[in-house]
Image (cartoon, helix red, strand yellow):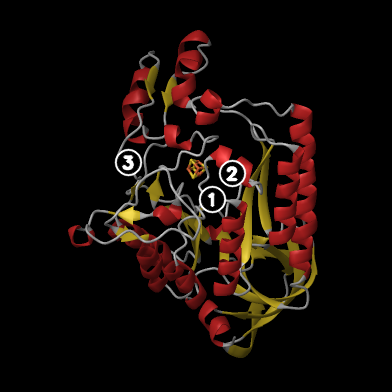
Amino acid sequence: MAERLKEEILHREKLVDVVAGPDAYRDLPRLLAAAESGQQAANVLLSLDETYADILPVQTSAGGTTAFVSIMRGCDNMCSYCIVPFTRGRERSRPIASILQEVRMLSDQGVKEVTLLGQNVNSFRDLSEVQFQSVAAPGLSRGFSTVYKAKAGGLRFSHLLDQVSRIDPEMRIRFTSPHPKDFPDEVLQLIQERHNICKQLHLPAQSGSTRVLEAMRRGYTREAYLELVHHVRDSIPGVSLSSDFIAGFCGETEEDHLQTVSLLQEVRYNVGFLFAYSMRQKTRAHHRLQDDVPADVKKRRLEQLIATFREEAARANAALVGQAQLVLVEGPSKRSASELCGRNDGNIKVIFPDAELEDAAEPGAPGRAQPGDYVMVKVTSASSQTLRGVPLYRTTLSRAAASH
Ligand code: SF4
């Protein structure tokens, strides 16, 4: 956005003193010094190699329980609606050694959940270690294709996931946002085997219509996507799935839209991110396609997708009622100080009363759960977004895994 609107916000509107693009943080001292001396300053250049390797993560939840760790940037996929390849540049991955060092540091600080971050997190490919430069490219998910040639060489996401999950058995590992094309069996197997890698996958579908997926240049059909969903569910029993959808993309007919509705019904996601299509300058769709679905139709289709998603998510979450779920406590619930809030392995919010609880390892020493503690909670009710339950006992991630 900074690049696109630089002229307008600096010169025409004179709205700001400094315009800094996503790769300009190292230049901030110079930009701010220029602004202090009364000049307007801008740096919107995209870097080919910036990975933020030495930037400390922003910790997001109360008590520093969870943290994000950037592992790669950029995207080579060129989906026709997306501006990311133009604003974030080509894919480049952070050296694995620096990622592991940061995760170790977070573990030492008591962080209990790390989310590995990147625009295409599972396309991770660290080329910094020479001995891995000739390793063959892993295969794509069945029925998936890319606009670029297979990239050989480098340490891949499965290796990173393996190494990161070995650092601290009490630390949960998540990752986002992945592309569905890059889920080789070794990644799925690792998620299934490691007790601290959350059984939760984001599989962005965008549409349920093969015709629209082709116009979006997503590189898969509805059938290939569904085959992947079945394979993921077979490989990781009980996996929680989330997805992204766009309503009203260029040329989307009512029939295409109904195919997206039916995909939502068929897959039954636990979490969904749904948006009405909004055309972005510079994208292929902007140059080659027509944003021809009227605004009121986009709105109606989006509402229908949201209603379908919620109905299905409520059903998926209702299946957890009566089950015990391991919850990482994040802090007091926003609505009531007498309740605690946390997330289960599937990243669904769980709320339960703050009460004295036994520790599974030390019976007879009850205490209240603190942010960063793991609590086993029996689910008593569920909505499309939240689970509620009664706490059973405090425990650890390893102990809970061993008792299953
Ligand atoms: S939607 Fe995702 S995969 Fe497609 S171009 Fe954008 S960032 Fe890349």
Tell me if mark 3 has few (under 14), some (14-19) or many (20+) residues whose alpha carbon lies within 10 angstroms of its own. some
Residue 213's disc is 2
Whether residues under marks 3 and 1 lie with C-beta atoms below 8 angstroms apart, the answer is no
* Camera sees residue 391: yes
SS assignment at label 1: loop
Whether residues under marks 3 and 2 lie with C-beta atoms below 8 angstroms apart, the answer is no
Instruction: Name the amino acid, label 1.
Output: Tyr
SS assignment at label 2: helix
> Is residue 400 left or right of 338 when viewed as pictured?
left
Q: Quadrant of residue 238?
A: bottom right
Residue 220's disc is 1
Of labels 2 and 1, earlier in sequence is: 2
Tell me if mark 2 has few (under 14), some (14-19) or many (20+) residues whose alpha carbon lies within 10 angstroms of its own. many
Q: Quadrant of residue 393?
A: bottom right
Instruction: Name the amino acid, label 2.
Output: Leu
For disc 3, the marked residue is 50
391 or 53: nearer the viewer: 53
Q: Nearer the viewer, mark 3 or mark 2?
A: 2
Residue at screen point 76% across, 71% down: 319
- Please, is residue 106 above or below residue 168 in the view? above
Whether residues under marks 2 and 1 lie with C-beta atoms below 8 angstroms apart, the answer is yes
Q: Residue furthest top?
A: 12
Instruction: Name the amino acid, label 3.
Output: Glu
Percent from the top left, x then y, of residue 289? 58, 27
> Disc 3 versus disc 2: distance between alpha carbons?
31 Å
Of labels 3 and 2, earlier in sequence is: 3
Q: Nearer the viewer, mark 3 or mark 1?
A: 1
